[in-house]
Image (tube, rainbow, N blue to C red):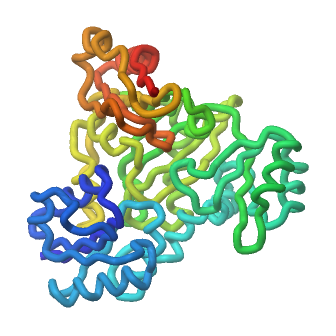
Amino acid sequence: MPNVVFAAPYFLEATARFVTAVASLPGVRLGLVSVEPEERLPKDLRARLAQHWRVDDGLDPGQLAWAVEEISRRIGGVDRLIGTLEELQVPLAEVRERLRIPGLAAETTRNFRDKSRMKDVLRSAGLPCAQHRLCETAQQCWEFVQGIGFPIVVKPPAGAGARNTFRVDAAEALREWLSVSPPRPGQAALLEEFILGDEFSFDSVTIGGSTIWSSISCYTPGPLEVQENAWIQWCVLLPRDISGSAFGQIADAGPRALAELGLDTGLTHMEWFRRRNGSIAISEVAVRPPGAQFTSLISYAHDFDLYRAWARLVVSGEFTPPERKYAAGAAYLRGQGQGRVKAIHGLDEIQREIGALIVEAKLPKPGDAPRPTYEGDGYVIVRHPETAKVEQALGRLVRTVRIELG
């Protein structure tokens, strides 16, 4: 009977789905570490926990180690220590090494978490990725720009979900940023070339160093453009057929990149670009399940439960590659205007036109505050055996549904 500890600082909806998936595995005894009190978990999930331990800082390795040790004493040891949050991956790896729990090593995890280090590894292996420089001074920033020109992208070295990432188009804008929030030793900024082209993800499962399964998702438009334009309602499309030459380059480069970064076993989310000249560039890779409803999208496209499959992978190292049976897609809806949610328009029309394709939806209620993230205030997921039908449905969704703020 494996004893598993799941670190989940806050009980977000997606987090609860992953915790529930682990708890549902046969024979698993589950301990949970969190900042939030156990009472905020759904009642049925609380009943499945063997032990819960609360900490003040869910990202602090010292507090995590203390919590895991206390849980271990009460349930008779810990066989796996896991979590889905991007910021948790290095602390979890450090605790695993400290307590001799099997899993991804801290040095390997840093290859995924530190985006500058990641690109150094990939570029040294001859893999395509964006030109970049980790800058600790304004002079280094100007030197980088002089080498590649504008526009550039500025991001934190260990960011997640496009947070604090923005585009700089000209010298005046760079000068303004440097005057307000300049990088300095110990607080470096990662500067990258801005790639013109289409953006995708390569989500994959690796076991024993071999990538045994992958999925492709297409962004329309890319997350950075969405982040910079609050009015854009965007989409993600999972084409049913990803076996053709259009994705041949990433099918080769993706597994090679994961091998160079040192991955043995895990589920990863890789973002990549196809440049206008047809070449590709890897943007960055996260060694965790994808966010922004991607885990649900992949589940719908393959008609299986990726939440549970991830749980089985990280607990027992097992994964059965599913067949892609459908095209699937999500339309992310964003409030227009100022204030709180006032009304949602276009739902009746959408239900008449594409209601049969909708498999999941989450919409805000009047009075809700708009969400500050690029994921928006609601989403609608559709699927169909034909990719063209899904593309058409997504187009209708973002053109027809409007969340009015006021």
| Residue 198 higher or lower than 270, as above or below | above
Q: Quadrant of residue 25?
A: bottom left
Please tell me which residue is depicted at 14% across the width and 69% down the height of the picture: 49
Q: Quadrant of residue 353?
A: top left
| Residue 108 higher or lower than 62, as above or below | above
Left or right of residue 249, residue 80 in this image: left
Q: Quadrant of residue 155?
A: bottom right
Q: Nearer the viewer, residue 26 or 375?
A: 375
Q: Position of residue 288 (x, y in %)?
A: 41, 58
Left or right of residue 209, residue 1 in this image: left
Q: Position of residue 207 (x, y in %)?
A: 35, 62
Left or right of residue 286, residue 207 in this image: left
Please tell me which residue is depicted at 35% across the width and 66% down the height of the picture: 9
Q: Is residue 141 visible?
A: yes
Please tell me which residue is depicted at 25% across the width and 79% down the height of the picture: 79
Please tell me which residue is depicted at 55% across the width and 39% down the height of the picture: 223
| Residue 98 higher or lower than 352, as above or below | below
Q: How many marks?
A: 0
Q: Position of residue 317 (x, y in %)?
A: 28, 65
Q: Nearer the viewer, residue 45 or 346?
A: 346
Left or right of residue 394, residue 231 in this image: right
| Residue 200 higher or lower than 282, as above or below | above
In which quadrant is the N terminus drawn? bottom left
Q: Position of residue 401 (x, y in %)?
A: 39, 19
Q: Nearer the viewer, residue 14 or 250?
A: 14
Q: Nearer the viewer, residue 149 or 280?
A: 149
